[in-house]
Amino acid sequence: MEQIILATNNAGKIQEIKEILKEFPVELISLKEAGMTIDVEEDQNTFEGNALKKAEEITKLTGKSCIADDSGICINFLKGFPGVETKRFLGEQATQEERNQYLIQQLEKVLEKEERKAQVVTCISLSTPNAPGKVFKGVVEGYISKTRRGSNGFGFDEIFELEDGRTLAELSKEEKNKISSRKQALQALQEFLRNQNERSK
């Protein structure tokens, strides 16, 4: 059975990817399970570039296929900020609460909902030893809320508001998983793998 390395040790991400790809005859293993402690620098200027770089570097080091991702939030009023700097725009030591509060403050004088538009973006890449890497993208459209709301999510969920007025952190886990940008990107990857399997039969 082919092994595919997942470029993460995040248990939640690993479980989600395993669930989506369970129909395929592959063994998915974390970086830790692969005996790797590598931390690939995310220095590209797009989510696609960062995801692809991580996957391709790990494939080069191991000779095995790799799945990697990069994600973040993009705010229209701030010209796409924080974008690829989502994890780092206040420095490595900042808490998520500080990052969320900072973004709310940047938009505190922006009262019209339409001017508070934002997107959550996830790019998932698949790198294999014998073919160019592929990138699959998911996007959720919404708005930056005026206050932090909800307790079910993580990251920017408490300030990312959907069309129905609820933040991602006010959704149940099941509701969020149906619409998340990661789910969209993984479903695109799943379809690609399914097509590859059909062609090889």
Image: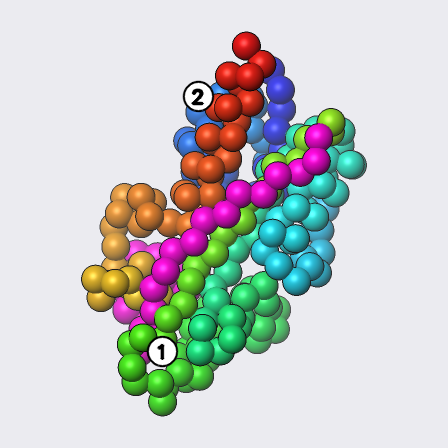
Q: Nearer the viewer, residue 20 or 11?
A: 20
Is 6 or 24 nearer to us in this picture?
24
Q: According to the image, label 1 marks what residue? A: 115
Question: Furthest-bottom residue in view?
Answer: 109
- Residue under label 2, please give it: 23
Q: Within 10 Å of the Cα at label 2, are there few (<14), some (14-19), or many (20+) other Cα atoms?
A: few
Q: Quadrant of the N terminus?
A: top right
- Residue 114, by quadrant, is bottom left
Above or below residue 173? Residue 145 is: below
How far apart marks 1 and 2 lie (CA) works out to 42 Å
Residue 142: percent from the left, percent from the top?
34, 64
Please give left or right for residue 141 compared with residue 85 in the image. left
Range shown magenta = 131-158
Q: Earlier in the sequence, mark 1 or mark 2?
A: 2
Query: Residue at image x 35%, y 85%?
Result: 110
Q: Is residue 7 visible?
A: yes
* Quarter of the figure with the C terminus: top right
- Crowding around mark 1 (Cα neighbors within 10 Å: few <14, some 14 to 19, many 20+) is some
Q: Position of residue 195 (x, y in %)?
A: 50, 24
Q: Which mark is residue 43?
A: none
What amino acid type is highlighted by mark number 2? Glu
Instruction: Determine the secondary structure under disc 2.
Output: loop
- The amino acid pointed to by label 1 is Glu
